Image: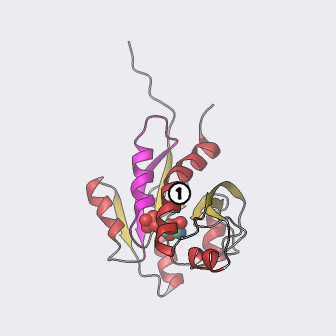
Amino acid sequence: MVKSIGPKKIRTAVFISGTGSNLKNLIKFSLKKKSPIEIILIISNNPKAKGLEYSKIYKIKKKIYNYNKKKISETKTLKDLKSNDINLICLAGFMKILSKDFINNFKGKILNIHPSLLPKYKGLNTHDRAIHNKEKYSGCTVHLVNSKLDSGKIILQKKVKLSKKETVSSLQKKILKHEHILYPKAISKLFANP
Ligand code: GRF
């Protein structure tokens, strides 16, 4: 009997700047038979990003551009994305803001994970602000990226309860665990075959 070859997976690039726990988690997800994505490329603006080690471990191509001169780095990145036939970008702790031009090149094909219940707490230091404001809940959001910071269409959110003694570090850990569940879930929601 001829083994049937499953449907083609979406060629995906993941952009990181640091630890890369979401990257690792997305790679593991991508290796599952049912996953709609395949991770082809890792982009980092930070040569010291810990997450770059997953390039070696999982044999995935990596490219590093410093993004100090954004236009130049974006042009190089776009060239890599085109030459690798990339069809989806997953931002995962990427700390640079992409230009409108760049985003227009990948309209509707860039996802981001943000550690708050958007539209609350766009930008940085989300946990600090949530605790300071005595929020009962925070959480994480997977959304499409448009040219306004953390403002694209929301795909999925997970609400997380703050404890009375919550610290930035405990909340960050708590929410990160949920990020690792939410990102693959959002990708499946968008692209999974019925
Ligand atoms: C995550 O909390 C993500 O939501 C935020 O940056 C953090 C990245 O963590 N955008 P990691 O590098 O994936 O471990």
Camera-side residue of 28 and 139: 139
Q: Which residues are magenta?
A: 18-45
In this rendering, the answer to whether 129 lies above or below 163 is below
For the point 52% across and 50% down, the residue is 181
Report if residue 79 is visible in the image: no
Spot occupied by residue 36 in the image (x, y as percentages of width and height): 52, 41
**Labels in figure, total:** 1
Tell which of 74 and 91 is nearer to you.
Answer: 91
Q: Secondary structure at mark 1?
A: helix
Relative height, residue 29 to residue 2 (above, below): below
Quadrant in which the C terminus appears:
top right
Task: List x then y, in percent, for residue 113.
Answer: 57, 62
Residue in the picture at 50% in, 61% down: 174
Which residue is pictured at 61% across the width and 75% down the height? Answer: 131
Determine if residue 8 is in view: yes
Residue projecting furthest to the top:
1
Q: Is residue 2 above or below residue 88?
A: above
Note whether ligand 1 is within 8 Å of mark 1. Answer: yes
Q: Is residue 15 magenta?
A: no
Name the residue that disc number 1 marks: 179
Asked if residue 101 is positioned above or below residue 55 in the image, the reply reads: below
Q: Amino acid at mark 1?
A: Glu
Q: Quadrant of the N terminus?
A: top left
Q: Is residue 101 left or right of residue 10?
A: right
